[in-house]
Image (cartoon, rainbow, N blue to C red):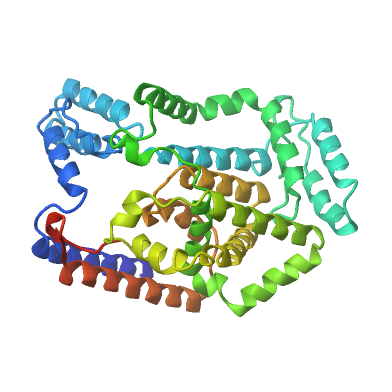
Amino acid sequence: MGKVAVAVIVSLWVISLSILVNHIVPEPYMDEIFHIPQAQQYCIGNFRSWDPMITTPPGLCCISYCSACYVSCMFEKELLVKCSGKLGALAVVIRQTNIVWMLFVACTGVINITLVRPRDNVEVNDIDTAIRKSNQSTSNDDLKSGSNLRQRKFSNSPGADKHSMPSASLVSTNHSSGLLDEVKVIFLALWHMKWELLVSFSPFLMVFVAFLAFIRWNGSVVLGAKEAHTVSPHFAQIMYFGLVSALAVAPLHCSKGQVVDLFQSFWKRRPISFFQVFVAVIAGFFSVHSFSIAHPYLIADNRHYPFYLWRKVINAHWLMKYLLVPLYVYSWFSIFQTLGKVQRKIWVLAFFLATAAVLVPAPLIEFRYYTIPFYFIILHSHINDYQSWLLMGLLYLAINVFTITIFLFRPFHWDHEPGIQRFIW
């Protein structure tokens, strides 16, 4: 009943807000002036038309077109197959950065198969040896957690495949195993299951190959406006994301209890934990000093939040970007700890690498780039505190109501460009 109530409330909110926005802002705004005419060209079947200012592939337009074909031609099998083919061929990459998250999903599948999924096998000597060697230098507590890696049951069935994995989980569900343990077990499992995994994950491989072919044909990650979206080493971007994500889940990461819990975990694992913090801080200072990019769109466009954050916070004083580094580092370590409570260390590492692969090459600071990794953080944080959910809900509601109010009722003009300008995310 609760889910139905939430669905009804969200539907009423979205529908009423859409009606209000379309009533007050009936004309295309910002990038809509490029995308709407492009979608109209595709709707009439003109696939040779392309606006060079659009950076993303036409996947969504093709999906809409093929959906229309499906509805209007349900009984014409030949045309239906033709439309489905267009859908599969042209909508392979709806947005370029999605290929990274597709690969991340594939990696999580490999992690689950190699570390969790029960398999039948009698050849586990290599894995036994790797785990024993990895645990020889650990403490008694680590040995106890490492013993969980060796838990399995053998299958004596005559049909057991000698190249499959042990039947019990190689890594315990309490995620206490070390990162190197997990990496070694995964690589050994990949070798034993290489052909099965290759077949299972071949669709992901095909999409990845198609993406590489797209880059080679296009000469860039984006389709249009290539000069403004060149790949750049924007390492400060990953720092910004950590702080924004921590503040967006402030009841979880910015509480006194979380600060104390994080410090206690560092103290238990000293001195290696303090060395990790030291390295992270040095990397943070180096990133904001040498790889902090002020994109022309960021400096010139006052219709977005990042413009004011850059001008009023990050660039308010030359020292400010350095003073924020400890907050960036704390945010990421807090995120790591929260995710580490419910996910394996190799999963957390894969998530960080995927996030970096998406954000670091992007020269422009935009919150929409943060959406997918932030969703992963929320979905895998397992927040069970209703008070935290309530506080976060009120925070999101206040920010969105403020943004929509400014967008609808506080338009402004630019001297160098005709038309009405509106503030938006």
Q: Position of residue 138 (x, y in %)?
A: 87, 52
Q: Please state the horizontal and vertical placement of residue 231, each as a whole percent of the image.
A: 44, 38
Q: Residue at x 30, y 65 (%)?
A: 7
Q: Nearer the viewer, residue 287 or 254?
A: 287
Question: Which quarter of the picture shows residue 52?
Answer: top left
Tell me where residue 261 appears, x and y as whole percent: 68, 72
Number of labels in the image equals 0
Q: If the image is split into quadrants, where does the C terminus sit?
A: bottom left
Residue 229 shown left or right of residue 16 in the figure = right
Q: Quadrant of the N terminus?
A: bottom left
**In front: 256, or 388?**
256
Q: Say whether residue 30 is left or right of residue 59.
A: left
365 and 114: which one is in front?
A: 365
Q: Residue at x 52, y 53 (%)?
A: 236
Does residue 194 appear in the picture of this structure? yes
Q: Residue at x 18, y 71 (%)?
A: 410
Relative image position of residue 25 (x, y in whole percent): 12, 61
| Furthest residue toward front | 318
Vertical relation: 47 (above or below) 235: above
